[in-house]
Amino acid sequence: MALLLHLSDLHLARDNSADVIGDSKWDVINLGDQQTRFGVIQDSLRALGQCLLYAHKELDSIVITGDITVKGEPAGFALLEEILDGLGEALPPRDRILIVPGNHDVVRDSKSSRRERYEGFLELRTLGYRTAYLEGVDLDREGTVLSRTVPEPLLTAQDNSFVLLGLNSANHSASGANPEEVLAPHLRELRESAASGNKAVEALLDAWESRGRTDIARLDRAQLVAGHRLLHSAPTPSDSTPLRVVALHHQVLPVAVTEEIKPFEHLSNLAEFRDWLVDNKVDAVLHGHKHEGRVMSDRHTVHHDPSDNAHEMLLVSAPTIQTGANRRDPVGYLLDIEGPAPRYSGISIAEVPAMEGGGVLAFADFTWIRQPIDTEVRNGVLEGQTVDEVYRQLIALRTQYGEIKKPLICRIVDGGSADRLPSDYPALPLSAGSRSDWFNTTVGWWQQRRELKAAPFTHGQRLFGTGSAPINQIDHAVDALKDDGESSRAVAVLLEPRRDFADERADFPAFVLVQFVIRGDALDVVAYFRKQEMPHWWPINMGEIARLQREVLSSVKKKRKSLRVGSITTITAMPVNGTAIPKVAVPVIDQEAEDPDGVLHFVLPLFVAGLDSAAADVEAQWKAVFDDWQPAAEAPADGDRAPRLGLAVLAGQVELLQELSGRDPHLADDLAAELTSLASVNKNFVMLTDKQALEERPQWVKSVARSSKKILELVHEILARRDLS
């Protein structure tokens, strides 16, 4: 999570009647004691700083989108440091504060692309603040950087959740229009007359120059070229997709219905800039200028390719304290940007309220509104080239599965990439071993085709026709595609109605149907799930489907040699979020117990003398296999893992080896009894309905903890006696 503070249009001034925000009808309070914009902003930032400090929250950075001062007054720039210092310990370093100029931050009637135009604004750099590149100062007409000593107007969040670029849209603001050449001699004559004391001529000349002053908002080519280069030079970590944010002073779309009658109400090259935003895959635009707080969704299709899909962006217009108003507007926005795929999770935005002197803010009282960016995500469609890209989106949305439209559709363009664990997959228990081994073992378990004792069914049994399902549906799918490349009959189902609908308590497949489709030269797969735990179980399902895709491709390719791996699409009717590895990842002890000899390495060292097994190593092995499935504080969305077979097999092996060895009969009996009891407790628990399990879980968790502790204590005591004999 990265917190970004967005301020704009501060118009800093002190002891200035234009800064008064109160309604003073009687001149009895000194100007310095009246309510002013400066005072309210200062008090509000002090309260915000204390609030963040108490909540142990850190500001990643600050962006100020222009109009620091009023009409280019140098005094306003000098006050910025005093205002920001009110944040106290919450203030980020100055090189993490990005400022872009507004139309009030340039010298009036100055020529564009000149150093003297930015005389006051450039003072901010001497204090260490990061600013937008300025034409004629930092950039030539081609967008080439003139000096490498100037810090880039680009910030990368400390957690890589966003990159922020500052652009200058004020290079032509507050400029005097050039009069026609034919008028030049007449103007000289009028100025001479005014200089000689002709007040009427002087007034007319002032009116002439005022009406000729244009407040043009524009993104020069130099800004667009340099901005493109900066955005594409920003590092993109392999484990995240940073939000691309652009900050400028002027608005990109109307933010209020109140009309403003003036020339150049918006950017003069607005269409060109909007195309640039799409071409550079910008996700959010922050701006000010209109003194109106508003957040809007925007869609734009570039002019050079109208057939292209519309690109979606978020437009954030910062609020500011108004003068002459009967309300207190917020002083800015806090933006909470969370990785690893913030475009899909959206941005949470909260207003920073205007505060009085000595006022107190509480972070818990902020009203956060999540602002989604991508409409497809809101419509329940996620797509990416690889399993990592799609999984990143799933993680970003993990708290929003109840809000998005359903079913949730996930499409991996390169289906072959799903045959590995996504890099962002949560940490595994130490007992799981290497991530790749755990993934391969778990996927392999659910694709096993032989009858198993530890599970009522596997997906492999249902698909390949072993055990109670005698039809090899995958062979039928292969035959259908070999005979007809456009066949839609290459379908396999995992439901067995007579069995699955017979008992409400019976295990029921969540993976319901898979279809193989040839599109062009690619073999695509579409799979349907009635319910799916997304953070932990979806990648395992993808691994299964990728292997099925590869197996079908290998068989069909004998006849259709140009066929390649295509996409994998999953359709999930009920996506859920879980906080722990779900029960579908079968406990290690149950996997090993499929072969009764598979658990001998746990039991033999307890009773057979002469084995070179250190007691500490044996105890660690037992502890690891119990830690593998111990219940978490919160139940996984897909239910708890609870071994049955493995515990019962362990109990039987303990009894057998004790009888053969003749060692410690009482301790061995106690150990076997405890293992048998725990297996029974687990069996009873997993047979409960979801509602019953929710009610009984606290007691089950206590029973598991007590019994597991007792089992490990008995193992320790048996080993201690072994080493004494």
Image (cartoon, rainbow, N blue to C red):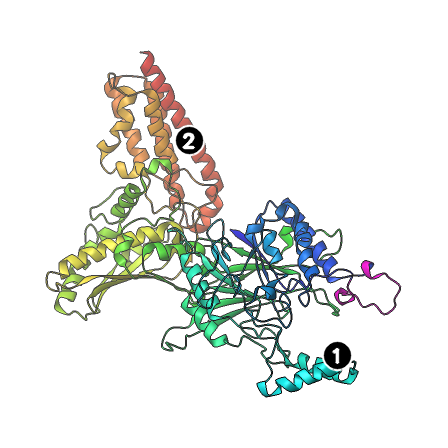
Q: Position of residue 402 (x, y in %)?
A: 47, 60
Q: Main secondary structure of the magenta part?
A: loop
- Which residue does the numbered mark 1 point to in the structure image? 195
User: Residue at label 2?
Assistant: 707
Q: Is residue 658 above or below residue 163?
A: above
Q: Nearer the viewer, residue 31 or 468?
A: 31
Q: How many marks?
A: 2
Question: Is residue 22 located in the magenta-colored stretch of the structure?
Answer: yes
Q: Which residues are magenta?
A: 16-32
Name the spot of residue 304 as percent of width and height, x first.
38, 76
Q: Residue shown at 22%/51% (left/top)?
A: 461
| Figure check: 444 above or below 384 | above
Does residue 295 show up magenta in the picture? no
Query: Which residue is at a point 69% across and 52% down the rendered structure image?
Result: 82
The first of marks 2 and 1 along the sequence is 1
Q: Position of residue 462 (x, y in %)?
A: 23, 54
Question: Regarding mark 1 in the picture, which secondary structure is present there?
Answer: helix
Taking the image as shown, residue 212 lies to the left or right of residue 610, namely right
Which quadrant: the C terminus?
top left
Please state which of residues 688 and 299 is positioned toward the viewer in this rendering.
299
* Nearer-the-camera pick, 481 or 589: 481
The image quadrant of residue 490 is bottom left
- Answer above or below: position of 530 versus 206: above
